[in-house]
Amino acid sequence: MELNEYQKELFEKQRPTIEKFSLRNWAWTIFFLMWIGFGGYALYLQIAVGHTVTGMRDNVVWGLYIANFIFFIGISYAGAVISGILHILEVEWRKPIIRIAEMITVISTIIGPIFILLCIGRLDRLHHLFLYPRLQSPITWDVFAIGTYFSGSVIFLYLAIIKDFAILRDANLNVPKWKKRLYKFFAIGYRGTHGQKRHIRISTNLMAIMIVPLAIIVHSVLSWIFGMTLRPGWHSTIFGPYFVLAAIYSGTGVLIMAMWVYRKMYKLHSYLLDKHFIFLGYIMMVLGAGYGYFTFSEYLTDWFASEKWNAEVIEKLFNPAKYGWWFLYSNLFGILIPIFVVAIPATRKPNWIALASFFMVIALWIKRYLIIVPTLESPLLPMEDTRMEYVKYHATWVEWALTLAGVATFFLFFTLISKFIPIIPISEFSNKEAKPKTGNQTVTETTTNPA
Amino acid sequence: MKANEETRDQGRLDFLKTAAVATVGALACGSLNCSCSKKPATPPPSGDKVKLLSPEGEIVEVDSAYLNHQEHMAIVSKLEAREGIAGKKFVMVVDLSRCKNARKCVNACQKWHYRPEDTEWLSVKLMKDSDKGAPYWFPKQCFHCDNPPCVKVCPVDATFKRSDGLVLIDNERCIGCKFCMAACPYSTRVFNWDEPDVPTYLKDQPYSPETGIPARVGTVEKCDFCPDRSREGLLPPCVEACPNGVFYFGDENEDIVTNGDETVSFSQLIRDGGAYRFMEELGTKPRVYYLPPKNRQFPVERGYEALPDKLKDRFRDVMEGKSHD
């Protein structure tokens, strides 16, 4: 593989990251592994003793796990929708960030479904989902939708790495033999011939076109797990689009955070430019406004009509003694602050945008919790239970340990993958992107096809 | 109690006699083998012969003394348990004006199904429809809806609707996703959060969705309208146990319901009594009808004052105007 001088520069920049596993990397890896191990112990307890070790009971049958499930599938939209759409629109500035975006997608699509498995009482009977599938169940739809989506995301990510694998294979890297073998294997004989380039280009275009509707289907189906029931706060027609939008929104936030961390950690300031943060910030702002609009119309209609059951859920969300503060936080930091941070020129800076994203992502996690728990705590019949744990949901340490283990897995995968493949795609790089540019940012490339 | 046992046995024998002709023999023979192995000492023959179909397809005559009644024995195959009892359409009418929260139904149900004290398949709620409205006792089982939201969402066909109207659960199929619990608007279903207490002698009982025994950890269960008892010509324990005849259980096809004391026409009962179905607006089409709590036989306090403190707590907010929190 022949590299131009910019690509060489970028390659040399990322070479130490791939060649060396520094002490700091080890420390983080061990730290994350410890968390995962702790989560493993919690999981062992949950399987050995039963779900009684969780805070879930007959009224609140789902809790943290489902919130995490929606959250992780949601942030996977960073790669699927953001990078898919930017690819279809041939937006040039996407190139340095697509790898990070697609990694978020694949990793969180692995972690998300694990959380729904944690909710299942009989893990030993999972094969029943395939032995006795019932098509009218939204869970069956989910199994197929997420399965297809995951395969699609892996292919989409892989197609974009093949050329980099070829570069790594041909470069004289100081890495163990097994790593070199893997590079060779994954490069599947790519030599940069005209035909190969064409195949990759066509496949990537096709995948980009397919992944967007697929992603929309996944989160719609997921929202219908709630929307299809006769429960106040869930039984809503806008749940499909509401969930999809919230998912893309949180995905953008995680992408910005990941960019910020990588830029700082690996000193990639000349590749992950300020404009990337600002452009993604604009996307985040628009999505935030849309998400805010959905939130407003959802709760306004429920509150205004004040049907008995809906009013009960709304009361829980508005009452400061119940979920009021959380609801306020989720709307303040999940909608208003990100919009203002991007809208005001003084705060339209990478650090500010990353900070706003951080609070926004947390706000969206809380929002998922607020969708699930208050509704389940408001059954249509009086609960009349004297056992407090049946009336009010409190997540136990087991659930928190497994939640943190999920987050740790996310970071661990990120650390390990960045040691294996370049975070900034080398092959996609052309001269224009390499130099930090200020001023006219709408410059487009003359070469229509970077491949 | 003794007399009760005898009726059960009689019912069982009656059933077996029909079963021999109706070729349910293979399983009945299974229960015969079972009873033989459990009772090594042979009782004296009674002279009353029962015809049974052997697994080889031959009709054999067995003295009834060699058959013993096995409670909660699965009497039909799992496949038949999914089909339902042919020609039946089970229905229940609950007369709210007669309920005084004696809780005999709850206890009978708990006992029959080996439920732990706190986990009730049948519960008596205290309802108060409006601020000024008078509270009333409201026994609530599974409504066995004709448009069951729980069955719709099950991903593995573990909960199913039968031809006789019952909604049952196969706890050997259930994966424990709890989607049915989230979908049921009546909070009917309960989950085995840990290993359920099942008496040791029932632990190895062959499981049937009709008996629900043995219960299993990580699966969902609920009121099943006791189809195993219906097959034996018996009423569900809640109906039998009620001292006030609150529950009428029967068959919509035959248009007959009974509370154990009186047997009446189902259609006439719901017509004359102005029956309604709970939360009809949800469109779930319950198979349980309620007769409104007018002209009540007991003041609502009767069901409250006698309760132990622990149970009183459930209703304290309504009865004493205090809140739970």
Image (spheres, rainbow, N blue to C red):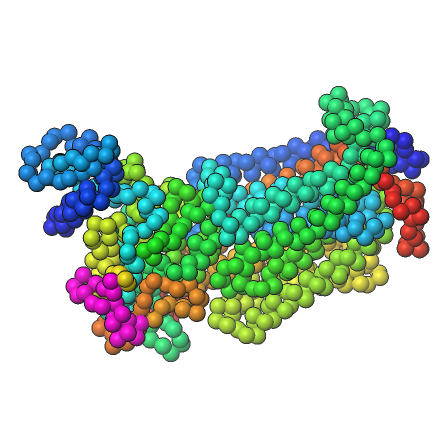
Q: Is residue A392 left or right of residue A209?
A: left
Looking at the picture, how far across and down is residue B30, in whole percent? Answer: 24, 35
Of A90 and A97, the residue lying toward us? A90
Seen at 71% across and 39% down, the residue is A155
Q: What is the quadrant of the C terminus of chain A in the image?
A: top right
Q: Nearer the viewer, residue B19 or A114?
A: B19
Location of residue B60 with respect to B223 vertically, above or below: above
Residue A257 in sight from this viewpoint: no
For the N terminus of chain A, give its image quadrant: top right
How many numbered marks are there? 0
Report if residue B259 lies within the magenta region. Answer: yes
Magenta includes A328? no
Residue A280 location, x and y as percent? 79, 54
Residue B107 sits above or below residue A24 on the image? below
Q: Residue furthest top?
A: A177
Residue B151 as seen in the image, left or right of residue A198: left
Depicted A258 relative to depicted A440: above or below? above
Q: Residue at x 36, y 51 (%)?
A: B168
Asked whether the viewer can see residue B239, the reply is: yes
Give the camera-side residue of A218 and A116: A218
Quadrant hosting residue B17:
top left
| Residue at 36%, 68% in the rendered image | B277
Which residue extends farthest bottom?
B132
Image position, residue A170 (x, y; %): 84, 26
> Is residue A158 or residue A326 the one in the foreground?
A158
Residue drawn at (79%, 38%) of the image? A199
- Residue interval drawn in magenta: B254-275
Q: Position of residue B179 (x, y in %)?
A: 48, 52
